[in-house]
Amino acid sequence: MTTPLLEGLSNFDINRLPEFLEHLQQQLISVQQKVQEHDHLLERMNQLEKENQVLKKDIVTKDLVIQELQSQIARGSARTTLQSDANQQSLPGVQAQQPATQDTQPAAVTQSGYLNAAKSGAKRSDPVRTAKRRLAAGRLFKSAALKGPQGYQYVYIGRSGKILRSEIRSAFRKVGVDTGRVLDICFPASGVIGVLLHTQYVETFTACMQKCEAEIIENFEPLDPKHIADPQYDALTSEERESLIYEFTNTRALQTLSFLRPLNVSGVGRYFVSAGWISQEELDTAVSEAIARLAEKEPKKANFLFKPSHITPHNHNNNNPVHSFPVSLSLWNANGLRQSVVHDVLSHVLNTHVLLVTETWLLSGSFPSDWSQFHLYGTKVPGAFGRGSGGITAFVSPSCPFTVSQLPSYNPHTLSLKVGTLTVHCVYLPPSLSSDKVLSILRSLPLHCDTIVCGDFNARFGSLLGDTRANARGNALAPWLEEASLSVLNETLAHGIPTFTTFRRQQEANSIIDLFLTNIGAVVC
């Protein structure tokens, strides 16, 4: 006797098994994406619930203040009425000389009562806050010698669980901490809060924490790999964990510099460089971005503090304007960019003006982000249930100080942009293209002054870039590079650093196929 399941299998066409498995894989991927989206929603709901609790507490506090003010007004009105009646009775002849009507006298008394009540209930200046403002103003009129030691540092304190930054600042105020001196609050490890302070305020802050018996963590090292608590990284080697904790610390430091007041970025950034969290080049970029932010909000102040140089560098007869601030471009091959991970990706490149992503597989629309976007859409893969291939997207940061616009498409494999005075061509050249076709695509691109060509070339140049070998496409492109006066920035800035890693037969295989090419400094304009 056969069951219905076995009967169904007996009628199943075994030749359709690959198609059935591929369809099942797509369904599993779809379910996985939905589960990830639900996890993000639940996390956001938990955050909103905590924020709601904080707001409810604030409302209760404000209600108590309102009740107290209302009672003060009522008491003040009653005292004023009694005092007015007593004064009238003590003056002889008042009633005869001022036979006021019943309408005018109560009105005068009520008006006087409201005025006195308003005065008695008026907000008085906070002596503590006034003193803080006075000291802050006085710091403007001290010489560098009298200001004392300068600099910034993190003080690390313990935490018992998850807590919002707003809750931390509220608790600081309750124990007497001047939150205006707190530049940043971060969470560098489980059970640890990092508080960024000016050096001169560290002693005062520490004393406040000791009074409330808070745990002060001495000799905390943010770059220690032991702070990686996520189980998904347990299988990493010690070298990989060291690299990962540096990436986390570096990203957190750059994110801090991106929201600090522009005039604090340089000083805090020097502290980050001395701690080994960021490089000098990253600090220079952060300072340039801070100056750009200040110039946008307070142009007069920025012009006064950072007067532009009147000396313009020239390259022979090159009269093109140069950038006041360096342009930061980043390149990444996504091999399929999911909507749910876009926010996390962009949070790791906050110091980038333009992020160029190849192989997005995007067929239409845009990604969920407040970054501006320019797209070269991919193409549908036949029989792959709507999955795309190829595609290029340029994400432009909200803090980008340059005008970015899309140029006409010169071929179906290139996204071309104008970034300030730079021309940027981002390409994705799949391995299936012949070398002749690749050369035809690249020769169709206009190479004006200050041009950058970047992307996934799938071309290997061997020892020129520090790669283990060359391939046919790389050998075919070498003469074109010389013909077009293009230099490969990977050779001088990232020699020997792989851009693609895969595993074959349980062996790691690396290659350098994502390239930056430029004619800047090589072409006379």
Image (cartoon, rainbow, N blue to C red):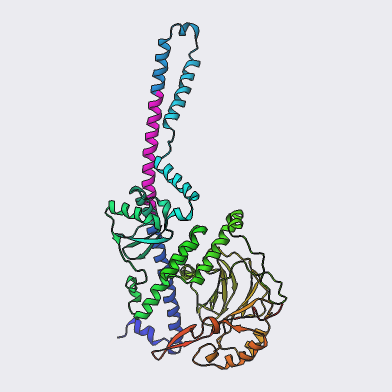
Q: Find the magenta span and give its range.
A: 48-77
Residue 322 placed where, x, y %? 65, 70
Left or right: where 9 falls relative to 348: left
Q: Is residue 353 above or below residue 264?
A: below
Q: Is residue 236 visible?
A: no
Q: Position of residue 327 (x, y in %)?
A: 58, 70
Q: Quadrant of residue 521?
A: bottom right
Q: Position of residue 278 (x, y in %)?
A: 45, 70
In the displayed image of the protein, which residue is found farthest to the front? 145
Q: Which residue occupies the foreground of this view, 312 or 295?
A: 312
The N terminus - image quarter? bottom left
Q: Residue furthest left?
A: 213
Residue under the point 34% across and 51% down: 171
Q: Is residue 64 magenta?
A: yes
Query: Residue 16 appears in which quarter of the rendering?
Result: bottom left
* Residue 213 position (above or below residue 360): above
Quarter holding the C terminus is bottom right
Q: Is residue 45 on the magenta stretch?
A: no
Q: How many marks?
A: 0
Q: Position of residue 51 (x, y in %)?
A: 39, 53
- In terms of depth relative to the viewer, which is nearer, 11 or 189? 189
Tell me, yes or no, if residue 356 can be seen here: yes
Residue 321's image quarter? bottom right
Our reading of the magenta stretch's main secondary structure is helix
**Foreground residue, 38 or 231?**
231
